[in-house]
Amino acid sequence: MQSLGFDFSAGKLVAGVDEVGRGPLVGNVVAAAVILNPEKPISGLADSKKLSEKKRNQLYAEIKDKALAWCVASASPEEIDEINILHASMLAMKRAVEGLNITPEFVYVDGNRCPDLKCPSEAVVKGDSKIAEISAASILAKVDRDREMELLDKEYPQYGFAKHKGYPTAVHFAALTEHGPLPEHRRSFKPVRELLETK
């Protein structure tokens, strides 16, 4: 995997950014931005979805410890409902990049489009398995969002959030039908919207 970090020959600080949580029916969409330190390499970086929970948690701590800069940001269910999930994902990524305590000179974005940033950027399809900075960002975003779902599970154990993380599974649909949507549910998402309409 390519790690760009600080390109000393070109003198450029490079960040990677990724988001997690477009598909779930509940909770924030979470993004992270990371600038790695080439003098403190991190082995085992990969697309967060391909790592075990234990490995993600291990790398999460290591990234926060070794990176030159990192930031995790989000967009709320209310924002998702107001501007749609695509724009909310872009907003969360923009917030993550702007929240870095070092301003990057270039940003690699996972996916096929870039948020509106003040510095040059490039979208990289499947970037989380190609560019180390994006992989690191995907791990921070995934761990933070999973932890949010675990907290929500403690508050509303009947929904099973710790297991399905808010994704539209049969267990989630059954809980939604039985107990109704929570304030944290995304009302613009079809299954939630249809349930609210029938009620």
Image (tube, helix red, strand yellow):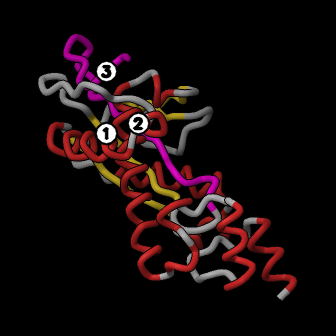
Q: Residue furthest bottom?
A: 199
Residue marked by disc 2: 51
- Name the residue type under label 1: Lys
Q: Residue at x 46, y 41 (%)?
A: 18
Asked which quadrant contains residue 35, the reply is top left
Q: Residue at x 46, y 66 (%)?
A: 149
Find numbered disc 3 in the image and state the secondary structure of the residue it sits on: loop
Q: Earlier in the sequence, mark 2 or mark 3?
A: 3
Report crowding for label 3: few under 14, some 14 to 19, many 20 or more residues within 10 A (C-alpha).
Answer: many
Instruction: From the viewer's side, name the closer residue of 135 and 7.
Output: 135
What numbered label is drawn on residue 55? Answer: 1
For the C terminus, the image quarter is bottom right
Q: Earlier in the sequence, mark 3 or mark 1?
A: 3
| Picture layout, residue 12 above or below residue 116 | above
Give the Cα separation between the discs numbered 3 and 1. Answer: 22 Å
Residue mark closest to the camera, 2 vs 3: 2
Task: Tell me whether circle 2 and circle 1 mark residues in contact (CB < 8 Å).
Answer: yes
Give the Cα separation between the discs numbered 2 and 1. Answer: 6 Å
Query: From where the camera sits, is residue 155 visible?
Result: yes
- Magenta region: 1-24
